[in-house]
Amino acid sequence: MSTGSAAIPLLKAAPERDQIAERLDGGSWRGLELCLAGHHVRDDAALQQAIGASRERLDGSGLAVTAEAPVSWPSGAFVSVDRLDDEARAGIERSAEFAAAVGSPVLTIHLFVPLDAAEFRSAGPLDDGEIERFLRFYADACAAREVKPLIENTPPVLRMRVGGFFLSRIGGHWQDLRRWRERVPELGFTIDTSHAALFRSFAAAYPSPFGLASDQGLELGRYVEELGPAAEVAHVSDAFGLLGEGLAYGSGELALDPIVRRLAELVRFVVAEINEPDHSVSPGMKAGYREIERAVAEGGNEAAPPPRRPPADDFDWQRVVGHRDPIPSVIELSELFEGRSILVTGAGGSIGSALTSLLLGFRPARIVLLDAHEGSLTADRRSRDADAQERLEYVLCDVREHALLHRHFAGAVPDVVFHLAAYKHVDLAERFPEEFVDTNLHGTWNVLRAAEAAGSERVVVASTDKAALGASFYGRTKRLLEQLTALAADRGEGGRIAVRLVNVLGSAGSASELFLRQARAGVPLTVTDTGMVRYWITMAHATTLVAHASLLAGEGHVLAGPTNLPEMTVGDLAERIWSGAGCEGSPALEEIGVREGETMREVLVGPGEEVGAEAHQGIAPISGDRGSDSAARVADRLTEGIGREQARSIWLEAMQGAETAPEPGGG
């Protein structure tokens, strides 16, 4: 709604005497938002106590009052808009009764269904009928007491007031709130600035869990314009990265002044909702209140329009694999990456670019993106907005160049290194073995030594399931690469791990990416052999796999691989991509035959290896003989100052002695 005049700024307090008194002390404040907790609506006696504590200070004061429902009920169960049980009914009615009794014209409740990460990934579709039943009961309970029911947008990661880590499939996007207002027109909105900013940050870093392709359309200004006309309340605080919620005004990364000025034109109440370390005192909240007053009084400085970008490809690769993408362990990853220096080799590739987007969400101090391909680095740089580029440094460098690589590592001093640079096409490895040993082996050894010299805490090296049996020359380079990584861990202080990737759907140059382009063009799909069996993961799974490997490296593991792997033939993959692209019937296929070095079936682990329990979503450690003794014999021959040609000869000689394990099933 348009207020016709500047909105009323509010502080926030629990309906408790001491906290209300503290909030109203030290200034001429215009009002309070009273935030209920579960124990305030436990029973009628508790409710009357909360009402009494509030009215004792507020009756006759002329202060404006708004009310907010609990995030959890008295039993500790979280409010969940798809669950209208007896406790929820009682909690809603008592919350509405509280709002009416203290003179609040509105009541806010969060539009969410909190689930832990495992529940979120495995849960079925939301029950729209149950959500409508909940929201209809909520709206009716408020209407019966002449209180306006409001629903609030939520962040992607719910830390909750009682602690923990939860997610919700509903409430983060402004479209969710508008959709439910269409079904329950009595509802209005509460806009939370930090929640909206955090949801956008998550969508930019890792959009697929929310069914998004990117963060497009999620700018904070867009939330204000989409929700503002039906909003009554705004919760204002700053935000940072994926987890920095409710920060003091001006302490995060939001340009709040123009947002606050626009909100003041649209809503009745603007709440300084700052998360105080000690809830008994409110210095940050009161400072935020004054900042809101200042911003509104100053006027001017309209927010800049969001940059226009090409739409992201929204093809649903999760549908192809038949299950949802892993959820990143955001708490642990934030602790590892925030404020740190990170270096990524092969950064211009598909996985490198997606990994960079995820890492940016954790707000490292700097990410050095290193690649030998100028076009890929330039394309990545052009795809990033100005805010992201402030944290990025682009370096054109070949990992095979020992001295140059060491100089760049010495300048970056990376805490964490992700080594993704590699040659990966099996048939080309059979034809050009010297190039593959030069990049996959000598380049990797250069990276491991440069990381050690720079004092890097952790190094993640990308390997492949083709290393398990070493049935191709490419696979054998990767198996020796794994042994070199284990050797580096043994000789140093740990923190080195190789992670086996499998076929990544949609990656540049992959069969799946070719199939999709052909399907959209309506031409036959070129397949090697329809009966060839492979493991497949989405790009999002590959990204979390590599990121989670850095956590396993800190736990002493030296090898890991993906979990929950769908296995399908190339023919099945072609059919699914054809269907997913909206094409009717079955695709026309053009078989070109198995390429040199390829096998009909691949495995994740070889003889003597075993996959452990899932450590984080989408990843598990792999145990077995490290094979670092043979790697050590090769590495010891690579003395300081050795030339590339001589090193190449040593690697090729080592490859000639590499063993090949038998292919399962007789091929």
Image: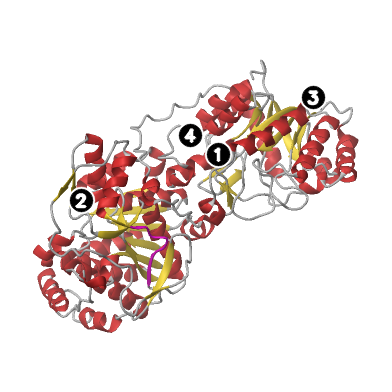
* Of residues 514 and 445, the one drawn nearer to the viewer in this rendering: 514
Give the alpha-carbon distance from disc 4 to disc 2, as whole Å: 32 Å
Which kind of residue does numbered mark 3 sit on?
Glu
Q: Is residue 204 magenta?
A: no
Report the mark closest to the observer, 4 or 2: 4
Q: Is residue 421 visible?
A: no
The dot on residue 373 is: 2
Which kind of residue does numbered mark 4 sit on?
Leu
Looking at the image, is mark 1 or mark 3 earlier in the sequence?
Answer: 3
Quadrant of residue 59 within the rendered picture: top right
Which kind of residue does numbered mark 1 sit on?
Gly
Give the alpha-carbon distance from disc 1 to disc 3, as whole Å: 28 Å
The dot on residue 172 is: 1
The dot on residue 218 is: 4
Residue at 69% of width from left, 31% of height from top?
136
Answer left or right for 474 relative to 305. Answer: left
Looking at the image, is mark 3 or mark 2 earlier in the sequence?
Answer: 3
Residue 183 percent coordinates (x, y): 61, 27
Crowdedness of circle 1 by 10 Å Cα count: few (<14), some, many (20+)? Answer: many
Task: Give the extent of the magenta segment.
Answer: 559-567
Q: Is residue 62 visible?
A: yes
Residue 329 percent coordinates (x, y): 50, 57
Crowdedness of circle 2 by 10 Å Cα count: few (<14), some, many (20+)? Answer: some
* Of residues 265 and 26, the one drawn nearer to the viewer in this rendering: 265
